[in-house]
Image: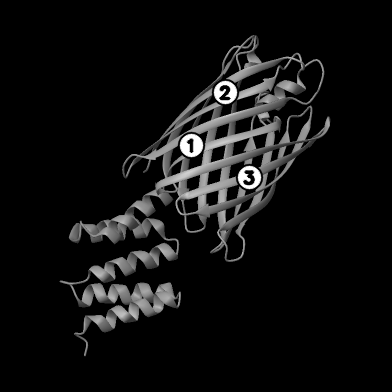
Amino acid sequence: DTTVIEVYQIRVDNEKFDKDFPMALRYSEDGIKRFPKDNEFFHIGKVQSMVAENTYHDALDAVNMALDSFPKNKELNSLKTFLLNQLIVDGLAVGASMDYFSKIYKPWLFGFLQYGRQTKMGAFITRLNVADRQYSNLTSLGIQGEIDFYPRLTKTSYLYLNVGYSPSAIFPSFRFGGEYYAKLGKSEFEGSLGMRYLDFLTNVVIMYTGSIGYYWGNEYINFRPFFINDINGWGSTYNILYRKFFSGKGDFIQVTIGGGVVPDERVLLFTFNAAENYRLDNQYVGIGYQKLVNAKFYSRFDLTVTRQDNFSEQTDYLYITSLGMTLGYRL
C-alpha cells in the first residue's frame, strides 16, 4: 500500500541505521514528493543524510527550505544551528590584536584578513597577516601569506596542513606545519601528532607536538606539549585548553594556561636578533569568547596575560597583556 507513510518512514530509518546515507537521502526525497502535505519527517531525514555525507552547504539550503514549511520544528532548527557552527569558517574574517608590555617596549600590533570555505574534502583557509613590532627601524613592519587546509581522511580522522611565506624580516621567510588527528577507538578522546617548521634565515626552528583531548557533553579539554629544536638546542612548553560550547563548536568560551619555553614565532625572532641567544621562559593564562551572532556574523574576543623573561635581561621579567578581536561574515 503506497499510501502508508509509516512504511516509507521505516525505509528511511533502516538506511540511516545501516549508515547507507546516499540511499537514505534518496528515500527521504521520495517521501517529500510522495507525501507533500505531511513530509516533515522526510525533510529531517534528508538534512541528516546530507550532514552525514559532509555536504554542509547543500544541507543548509535544504534545512532552510524545510523551515519555510515547518518553522517551529525543533529538530530542523537544531540542525540549522549545527550547520551554521560547522560553516563558521566560510566567508571573510578580519582581526586585530595588540601586545602591551609592562615596561620598555612599545605595543606590538597585529592584524589579519582571511577567506575560508568548508568543502566536502575539509576546510580551506587563506590568510594575509600584517604586523608592526614598533622597533626603531623599518624592519618592524611585515606581511605574511598563509594557507590552512583540514582534509578529512575518514569519519573519525583528519589532517591539519599549513604553509606560509613572508618577504619581511619579522616573520619566518617560510613555514610549514602538519598534524594528524584521530578519535581514539570508540572513546570520546581525540589524539594528534604533528610538527611545525619555521625558517628565519638566521635560524631554523622545528617544533614537534601532539595533543590529547576529551569531549564530555558540551565541554572539551585538551593538553598540548611542544618540543622545540633550533641552534640553541632543545626546549619544551605546554598548553592546557578548556572550552564550554553553547549552540555548537563555533560558539564557546575558553580558558588556556601554559608555560615553558616561549614557542611564539614573534618572540623567537626577537630572541635570535638579541645580543645573546638564550631560551625565554614564560607562564600565561588566557580567556576567549566566540559567539555565533546570527546566520551571517560571528565575533571573537581574546585576552591573555603573560609573565615572561625580558628580551634583553634574562634575570628580569615583564608582563604582556594581549587583546584580540575578530569579526567574521559568512558569504
The residue type indicated by label 3 comes to Phe
Task: Tell which circle, 3 or 2, labels the residue nearer the N-terminal end.
Answer: 2
Up the image or down, 6 lies above or below 183; here it is below
Q: Residue at label 3?
A: 223
Whether residue 173 is visible: no
* Residue labelled with disc 2: 131
- Mark 2, Cα crowd under 10 Å, few <14 / some 14-19 / many 20+, is many
Instruction: Classify 10 Å Cα crowding around label 1: few (below 14), some (14-19), many (20 and above).
Output: many
Mark 3 to mark 2: distance in Å?
29 Å
Q: Which is more toward the observer, 170 or 48?
A: 48
Tell me what residue is drawn at x 31 percent, y 57 percent.
Answer: 61
Q: Name the foreground residue: 89 vs 184.
A: 184
Quick check: 217 left or right of 162? Answer: left
Place of residue 186 in the rendered image (x, y in percent of width and height, measured from the top left) = 57, 66
Instruction: List the residue tagged with mark 1.
Output: 114
Q: CA distance from mark 1 to mark 2?
A: 15 Å
Q: Earlier in the sequence, mark 1 or mark 3?
A: 1
Q: Is residue 268 above or below residue 198?
A: above
